[in-house]
Amino acid sequence: MESSDIRDELTDILVTEKEIQDKLRELAARIDEDYAGKDVLLVGVLKGAVMVMADLARSLCGHVQMDWMAVSSYGAGTKSSGVVQIRKDLDSDLTNRHVLIVEDIIDSGLTLSWLLENFESRGAASIEVCALLRKPDAAKVQIDCKYVGFDIPNEFVVGYGLDFAERYRNLRDVAVLAPHVYS
Ligand code: 5GP
Ligand code: MG
Ligand code: MG
């Protein structure tokens, strides 16, 4: 694939940069209120959540710490395999911590349901989820996600951290990848 004009490889822009930033500020205000007086451990799920983490964290006023976990359930394709693999574990001990998992997108929910179970066994005081995007029509398991940015249709999206074969993460908006790119 030639890297000519990226815009030709996208169809609709589903969420614009401005909408993302406004929403993250709104979610951050709620999080600040809910965690007032507590230290929060933000756990970003690499690599997709890097942009959400960077912008959400900078909108928070309270004390936060950040840690990262890398898991994979997708490979280079566009469908979840359901098999979750830890590529990089957390550096932090979760015992008695207030953990807020920061995710780019909840699709089937399989990755998060696995992560939630895994984190619960590590003795956290509380565990919540913040996801920028969610595809309700793709859910295979129900995830209790306290902070959701946008519900989107069941289409493969890229941008703002989300990739296809490691490309498109640098786009500022969230857009639908044109089917001709992956079919
Ligand atoms: P799930 O386990 O909920 O199906 O999704 C696991 C991960 O797959 C997400 O955190 C995300 O990194 C990736 N993923 C799910 N849906 C999409 C999508 O529409 N576009 C991209 N680029 N990644 C997705
Ligand atoms: Mg993710
Ligand atoms: Mg990916």
Image (tube, grey):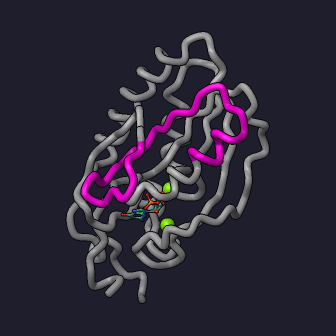
User: Horizontally, is 32 left or right of 158 in the view?
Assistant: right
Q: Is residue 128 magenta?
A: yes
User: Horizontally, is 29 left or right of 7 in the view?
Assistant: right
Numbered range of the magenta stretch:
116-143
Judging depth in this view, the residue of 39 and 61 nearest the camera is 39
User: Could you tell me residue 111's position as x and y percent?
Assistant: 51, 57
The residue drawn where x is 65% and y is 31% is 41
User: Horizontally, is 88 left or right of 101 in the view?
Assistant: right
Judging depth in this view, the residue of 114 and 152 nearest the camera is 114
Q: Residue furthest top?
A: 37
User: Could you tell me residue 119's position as x and y percent?
Assistant: 65, 42
Judging depth in this view, the residue of 30 and 96 nearest the camera is 96
Quarter of the picture containing the C terminus is bottom left
Q: Quadrant of residue 53?
A: top right
User: Could you tell me residue 143's position as x and y percent?
Assistant: 41, 45
Quarter of the picture containing the N terminus is bottom left
The residue drawn where x is 50% and y is 78% is 76
Judging depth in this view, the residue of 44 and 109 nearest the camera is 109
**Residue 160 visible in the current orientation:** yes
The residue drawn where x is 32% and y is 67% is 156
**Residue 107 visible in the current orientation:** no
Q: Quadrant of residue 93?
A: top right
Q: Is residue 100 above or below residue 91?
A: above
Q: Quadrant of residue 95?
A: top right
